[in-house]
Amino acid sequence: MLKNMTGLVKLILRNCNISGEIPPYLWTLQKLEMLDLSFNKLIGEIPTTISLKRLRFLFLTGNSLRGSVPDSIFIDGSNVLRTSKRKIKRPIKYINYRDYTRGDM
């Protein structure tokens, strides 16, 4: 189970038909640098406090998330969040997914 994989650095679950809310344990994976949950059927809100200090890339595009993006995601200003513009409100830095595939991470 993912919950027990505390050494995860990259977790890509893009377009996996995942539904429901984002599991809370994902926000506790302290070594996580990249989380891609794009193009699933996720609902709910991002928690107000996230202390993933190594998280650099977060992709949430193509879900039905609502609410605001918490400032804690952008602890050092270097983190990048990609969301559906119409669903989550906040001035957001964007990265093209193809940029990541070129090795920008």
Image: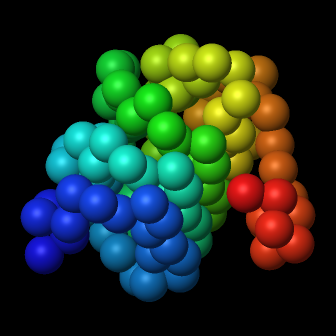
23 or 78, which is in the foreground?
Answer: 78
In the foreground, 42 or 102: 102
Q: Is residue 61 visible?
A: yes
Question: Going by the image, does 40 lie left or right of 23?
Answer: right
| Quadrant showing the N terminus | bottom left
Left of 57 or right of it: where is 3?
A: left
Give 60 or 52, whichever is nearer the viewer.
52
Along the line of sight, which residue is nearer the eye, 86 or 56? 56
Q: Residue at left 24%, top 41%?
A: 28
Task: Check the image and report above or below for 72 versus 54.
Answer: above
From the top left corner, tell me how far across and down residue 4 is, in percent. Answer: 11, 64
Q: Is residue 5 above or below residue 105?
A: below
Residue 37 in view (yes/no):
no
For image coordinates 88% across by 64% down, the residue present is: 99
Where's the C terminus, which quadrant?
bottom right
- Image position of 35 (left or right of 61): left
Identified at 45% across, 30% down, the residue is: 53
Q: Quadrant of residue 89?
A: top right
Q: How many marks?
A: 0
Q: Position of residue 5 (x, y in %)?
A: 20, 66
Q: Which residue shows up at 35% across the image and 63% down it? A: 8
Q: Position of residue 51 (x, y in %)?
A: 36, 26
Q: To which quarter of the image does residue 18 belong?
A: bottom left
Q: Position of residue 94 (x, y in %)?
A: 81, 43
Seen from this angle, which residue lies furthest bottom?
A: 16
Colour mapping used in the image: rainbow
